[in-house]
Image (cartoon, rainbow, N blue to C red):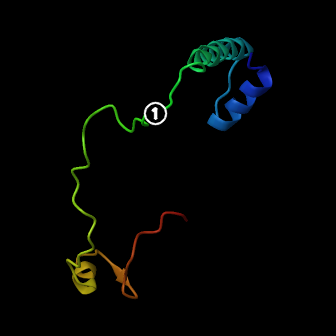
Amino acid sequence: MINSDEIKKFETLVKIELTEAERELFSRRLSEFFDSLGAFAGVRTDGVEPLVTALGVKNVFREDIPVKNHTRDELLAAAPETYGGCYRAPRTVE
């Protein structure tokens, strides 16, 4: 069974805070889940290809070929403000 210390580590990782009752419930449910995975231990997978996707789809995106569409000056002309040949963004931290 997953102990309370492991649950507390999980709380720290995901930045949540559980009550003691929630920790016990979470511990019990996670333990049940991991125990149920043991049913797969005896399944023979020799010669089985890894499944990448359950759907028979292929990548329909274009080839990633670099193309120069605009000049630097054209892009900077569209900027609301520039400085030293670069976009100038408003300050976000005072």
Residue 68 found in image quarter = bottom left
Residue found at x 43% / y 37%: 50
Quadrant occupied by the N terminus? top right
Per the image, label 1 sits on a secondary structure element best described as loop
| Total number of numbered discs in the rendering | 1
Residue found at x 70% / y 35%: 12
Above or below 27: residue 75: below
Please provide percent x and percent y for residue 52: 39, 39
Above or below 85: residue 26: above
Is 49 situated left or right of 46 in this image?
Answer: left
Residue annotated with mark 1: 47
The one of 21 and 55 positioned closer to us in this rendering: 55
Quadrant occupied by the C terminus? bottom right
Please provide percent x and percent y for residue 60: 21, 50
The one of 44 and 36 positioned closer to us in this rendering: 44
Residue found at x 73% / y 32%: 9
Residue found at x 63% / y 12%: 32
Is 39 situated left or right of 28 in this image?
Answer: left
Please provide percent x and percent y for residue 21: 71, 11
Is 53 situated left or right of 48 in this image?
Answer: left
